[in-house]
Amino acid sequence: GAGVSQTPSNKVTEKGKYVELRCDPISGHTALYWYRQSLGQGPEFLIYFQGTGAADDSGLPNDRFFAVRPEGSVSTLKIQRTERGDSAVYLCASSLAGATYNEQFFGPGTRLTVL
Amino acid sequence: RKEVEQDPGPFNVPEGATVAFNCTYSNSASQSFFWYRQDCRKEPKLLMSVYSSGNEDGRFTAQLNRASQYISLLIRDSKLSDSATYLCVVTVYGNKLVFGAGTILRVKS
């Protein structure tokens, strides 16, 4: 079946602009995660949704970052007033439920470049 | 100090070699342990979970030492297709994954 999809695959923007990154999880997966991966580093947790609600947003770096999942499926990560330091690959993952034994399946990521 | 630390490598090995990667984690409350594989410019994929009793999947063997807070991955009979970055991953509370920076493996013919 279809895996996790993310759009766009690449996004180039200018400092100060607003961006939205979209994630379509695997059908039936109730848990959805956002991670951010900088060059030469492992992915870093941002936020976790169980259904429509954000169960853990402890990884969001500041209030410029916000994510929603209004219908419990597709999620959008929103970044306001982008900064050059926001440049990274933003990865989305989904799993059947929120337990650690349920494998998280990652999407291909959105490569964000802030000029 | 990073929560999960790995030797970044790269490890350059010939085909058929045995190679071992190590990883240490700082939080003694860590609950679950994994190795993920990430190919260049691709997403991470689960390679295997790691248990205290040790576990094996074909050419891959993973070990966990909770007392030393140490995780290892052994790859036997390396193949060219094993070339990738290997990410050590733990969970502490709930299900957010905490990744190491990864170890690069290059298998050469």
Image: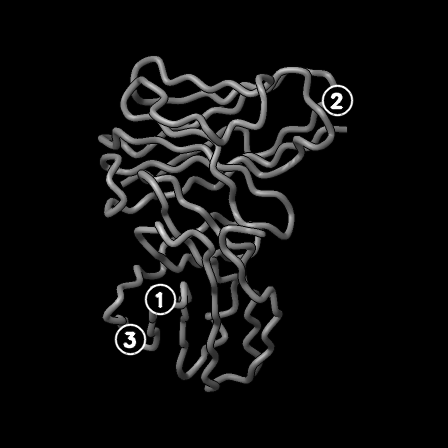
Q: Chain of mark 3?
A: B
Per the image, the residue denoted by label 1 is B67
Q: Residue at x 31, y 63 (%)?
A: B50
Q: Chain of mark 1?
A: B
Per the image, the residue denoted by label 2 is A14
Residue A27 sits above or below residue B68 on the image = above
Q: Amino acid at mark 3?
A: Gly
| Numbered marks: total | 3
Residue B40 sits above or below residue A56 on the image = below
Secondary structure, mark 3, is loop
Per the image, the residue denoted by label 3 is B58
- Label 2–label 3 contact, CB within 8 A: no
Tell me the tag on residue A68: none
In space, the residues marked 2 and 1 are separated at their CA atoms by: 48 Å
Which color scheme did the rendering employ for the protein?
one colour
In space, the residues marked 3 and 1 are separated at their CA atoms by: 27 Å
Residue B98 sits above or below residue B70 on the image = above
Q: Amino acid at mark 1?
A: Ala
User: x, y percentage for residue A98?
Assistant: 26, 35
Q: Which is nearer the eye, B87 or A8? A: B87
User: x, y percentage for residue A55?
Assistant: 34, 25
Q: Which is nearer the eye, A52 or B23? A: B23
Q: Chain of mark 2?
A: A
Q: Is residue A23 left or right of residue B55?
A: right
Of the 4 image quadrants, the one containing the N terminus of chain A is top left
Q: Residue at x 39, y 82 (%)?
A: B76
Residue B30 sits above or below residue A77 on the image = below
- Label 3–label 1 contact, CB within 8 A: no
Q: Residue at x 56, y 21 (%)?
A: A65
